[in-house]
Image (cartoon, grey):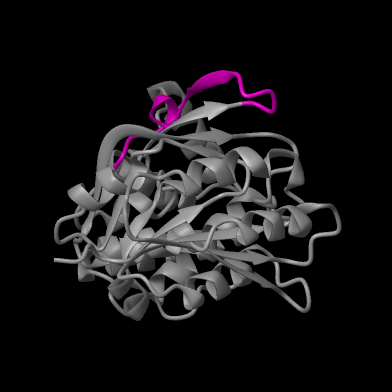
Amino acid sequence: MEPALISIAVCTYNGEKYLREQLDSLTEQDYPSLEIVIVDDCSSDGTYTLLEQYQQRNDQIRLYKNEENLGFNKNFARALSLCKGSFIAIADQDDIWDLHKISLMMASIDDNLLLYHDSAIIDHNGSLTGKMSDGHRFVKGQCTAYLLYNNSISGHACFFNKELLSHTGPFPENMYYDWWMAYTAACLGRLDFIMDTLVYHRRHLSNSTVKDTINDKDRRVRNLNIFRDHPLNPKETEYLISKLLHAYQLLLNTTFSFYLCYLLIANSEKIFYTRKKSLFSRIKFIIKESQS
């Protein structure tokens, strides 16, 4: 039987500096049926020229260039829409993949909609600085409450059944696409992980993930509003979100919300689980969060 076609979705933007190492690790994957879908978001450096060079000698690569800059989320949405594979993996332009990554993920996904893995963290020089699991706990199954405040599921680690896209709808404009995809898979209870370290994930000042311009508390409230409207929400999580949003609304009229403080403490084992923090750090956060 022919192996299933798997797509690797890559979005590029002014990534010439580290791109060659990543392209080599993608084109040398040991899985036999791959397409590499690359969408460039109007790079102004030598990124697109380098991509053309790789495309000319590798027929797995399908290369596109946007007519105008779409930005991070919309560019990935376009890349995913162009993928023909039954399964899709997401690749950042400046990482380096284990050459067995696709084979291992395909062998492990089973009936899950989304599977993710651990990653090694490297700096701009390629020096190892740690692992994703050093600071995060991974979650699986119907774990929506665990994803309300923090996300431990990075796009570069995601491997998913294309069926997932039929449940996500358009990516919310003000939320990272990987967080929304993970939350959707969790709503359906079809989210899992493996602890294999399959990517060297590069962190440096030019990473494409842009920081929010609003303060953290406003961002959390914004995210809760987005999650509240997810059509697949489990009733228990929907109820928790409604109570949290009500508590934040009450906070607008007082200097300290004992109700919000109570909710955060009562649900702390879930909503703070993914981020590895000391008990003191949790308490400090809850007190600050409950203040206006």
Q: Is residue 11 left or right of residue 161?
A: right
Q: Is residue 266 left or right of residue 171?
A: left
Q: Quadrant of residue 272?
A: top left
Residue furthest toward the front?
A: 57
- 254 is higher (above) or lower (below) than 283: below
Q: Is residue 56 left or right of residue 192?
A: right
Residue furthest toward the right?
A: 44
Image spot of residue 211 (x, y percent): 69, 50
Q: Please say whether residue 254 is visible from this viewpoint.
A: no
Q: Quadrant of residue 138?
A: top left
Q: How many marks?
A: 0
In what quadrant of the picture does the N terminus appear?
bottom left
- 132 is higher (above) or lower (below) than 80: above
Is residue 289 or residue 77 the one in the foreground? 77
Boundaries of the magenta span: 123-138
Residue 137 colored in magenta in the image: yes
Q: Quadrant of residue 179?
A: bottom left
Please name the residue shown 64% across and 26% down the image: 123
Residue 238 colored in magenta in the image: no
Please name the residue shown 25% across and 65% down the image: 4
Q: Please say whether residue 67 is visible from this viewpoint.
A: yes
Image spot of residue 277 (x, y percent): 42, 27
Please name the residue shown 30% across and 32% down the image: 196
Image spot of residue 58 (x, y percent): 55, 57
- 216 is higher (above) or lower (below) than 56: above
Is residue 50 or residue 224 the one in the foreground? 50
